Image: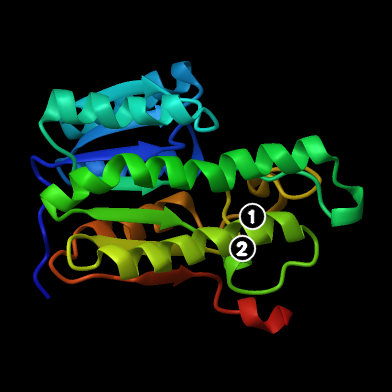
Amino acid sequence: MTRHSLDGGTAVAAGVSAGVGRATARALAREGATVVLAARSEDRLGDVASTAREECDTAALVVPTDVRDENAVVAPVEATVERCCGLDVLVDNAGLTRGGPIENMPTEQYRTMMDTNVDWILFAARAVIPHLRESAGTMVFLGSFAGRSPHASNPVYAANKWWTRGSGKSLSAQVCDDFAVSVVNPAELRTEFGDEDATPFEERSDEGDAGEPADIAEAVVLAATRPPSMAPEIDLSRRDKFELF
């Protein structure tokens, strides 16, 4: 299969201050892409950008972004198109989890999850579709194993990820003649991302017991380097995952 080069291309990656997003930004930079980094933590973005420049000898732009703000979501896209004369890849990695069982979840936490995990996808897609059509590029959604199977401990987060996956699939049906859309579904990962009791997964698992951010970054690069073919969906989990069901 022919591999599409990202060398000289441009990628916007959201939610890149740590974990999967950070690893993905570095992986895209190693492919030679200019990376535009979007997240709320400006200090962390600066560190990711410096690493990309030093390790990969590529350009990295920092655009502090609150993905819950509809107008702010447009900023990294506009900055990319203005500075780089186009856009080739969007990686939609922004997300969080709160609460647990539905009966115990405060409305405020529910709204925060919906604003961050769901509404942002619409805002970002609306902003980038014209530019990805022009470049015949790729949009990558970060889904989750929770968006494929029942998730009793945190059903609202699972519903968000079902929505993410459904959005990616439906958008792909709409735009497949123009650009590629992929959904990457990780299971547990050793990152700062927490579960329903806010304990980071990296503190609850030893090396080898769960996936690593670099694994997901490789899957994102795989999806982004497939045009003109497409990887509609990539699942990554432990080999014993389904023994839990």
For residue 224, which numbered disc appears in the image? none
In this view of the protein, which residue sits in the foreground, 215 or 34? 34
Q: Amino acid at mark 2?
A: Asp
Q: Amino acid at mark 1?
A: Asp
Residue depicted at x 17% and y 71%: 229
Split into 4 quadrants, where in the image is the N terminus? bottom left
Is the residue marked by circle 1 packed among few (<14), some (14-19), or many (20+) residues within 10 Å? few
Let me know if residue 47 appears in the view.
yes
Query: Where is residue 197 shown, x and y percent of the image?
Result: 81, 45
Q: What number is the disc on residue 209?
A: 2
Query: Taking 174 as reference, is 24 above or below it?
Result: above
**Left or right, 181 with reference to 43:** left
Q: Are marks 2 and 1 in contact (CB under 8 Å)?
A: yes
Up the image or down, 27 lies above or below 141; here it is: above
| Secondary structure state at the residue bearing disc 1 | loop
Q: Is residue 27 above or below residue 149?
A: above
Find the residue positioned furthest to the top. 43
Q: Give the quadrant of residue 103.
A: bottom right
Is 38 left, or right, of 244 in this rendering?
A: left
Tell me the distance, in whole angstroms, between the alpha carbons under discs 2 and 1: 5 Å
Q: Is residue 50 visible?
A: no
Furthest toward the right, the residue is 103
Q: Tell me what residue is drawn at x 8 percent, y 70 percent.
A: 2
Give the residue at mark 1.
Answer: 206
Which residue is nearer to you in this view: 223 or 57?
223
